[in-house]
Amino acid sequence: MKVVILAGGFGTRISEESEYKPKPMIEIGGKPILWHIMKEYSYYGYNEFVICAGYKQHVIKEWFADYFLHTSDITFDFTQGNKMIVHNQYSEPWKVTVVDTGLNTMTGGRIKRIQPYIGNEPFLMTYGDGVCDVDISKLVQFHEQHGKIATLTSVLLEQAKGVLDIGGDNAVHSFREKSAVDGAPINAGYMVLNPEIFDYIDGDETVFEKGPLEKLAEEGQLMSYSHKGFWQCMDTKREKDILEHLLTKNKAPWKKWEES
């Protein structure tokens, strides 16, 4: 099962750094938050990624192109014809496809554009600016058991994100986008989507969190996996500092992998 990560937005609310790079490439603990998200999925055995890039997409491509340099010791021997020797090379077991999904494309449009790389298979999808300690294996199992088109992970936080009306059967009866803070369950990303999802997306102007998710909820095809653990987005400098602090104190709940 492939993992799709939305990484193409402008990141205007954390403009201190996103002026120069896509928000998913802003570093926490010395690595882009995108890398942390990928390490989460890899911990559960999901190692094939499709990155929906857009704003400054070349930064993402260049970072992965040089990844082996980031994780190895290098000798540059200019006495032997500019020879480069790689020592102690470590690489992740990843296959990464970075797709330029357009500069101004909306979230739904970005998902639609990567359809050729997914094929007719279910896939995982999340946003490139938040980390979570959800058990992805259990999330996938939950999705496979209920048989609906889409599952999203919900968390109960007092934030103005996509707000959900969830019934006792875990079905999402309605979905509404950002509103006043009211303590309702919110959409934390970490979704599992069947390929039928592409039929709900018209094109580049489609906002995934509006038309498609709202229609799925109306049709009884959107389910919620309730997560009572850690989730944190990185919309602001303050939220970035929270994640940095957790990493510094070795108390980052999403970091389940061992250091290489």
Image (cartoon, rainbow, N blue to C red):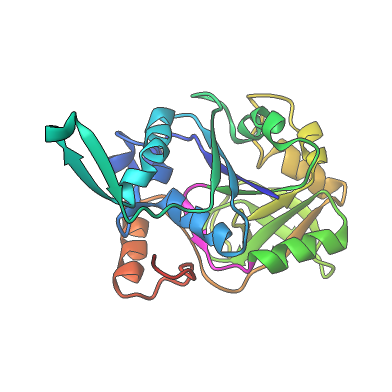
**Quick check: 58 left or right of 219?**
left
Identity of the residue drawn at 71% across and 29% down: 116
Residue 171 in percent (x, y) is at 82, 60
Q: Quadrant of residue 252?
A: bottom left
**Quick check: 244 left or right of 195?**
left
Identity of the residue drawn at 35% across and 53% down: 31
Residue 32, relative to residue 101: is it above or below? Answer: below
Of 55 and 96, nearer the camera is 96
Q: Which residues are magenta?
A: 128-135
Asked if residue 63 is among those painted magenta in the image, a careful observer would answer no
Q: Residue lying at the far left in this picture: please name it.
A: 79
Of 39 and 197, nearer the camera is 39
Of 53 and 107, nearer the camera is 53
Asked if residue 134 is among those painted magenta in the image, a careful observer would answer yes
Identity of the residue drawn at 40% across and 36% down: 65
Q: Say whether residue 178 is visible.
A: no
Residue 72 in percent (x, y) is at 31, 51
Residue 60 in percent (x, y) is at 42, 36
Q: Quadrant of residue 166?
A: bottom right
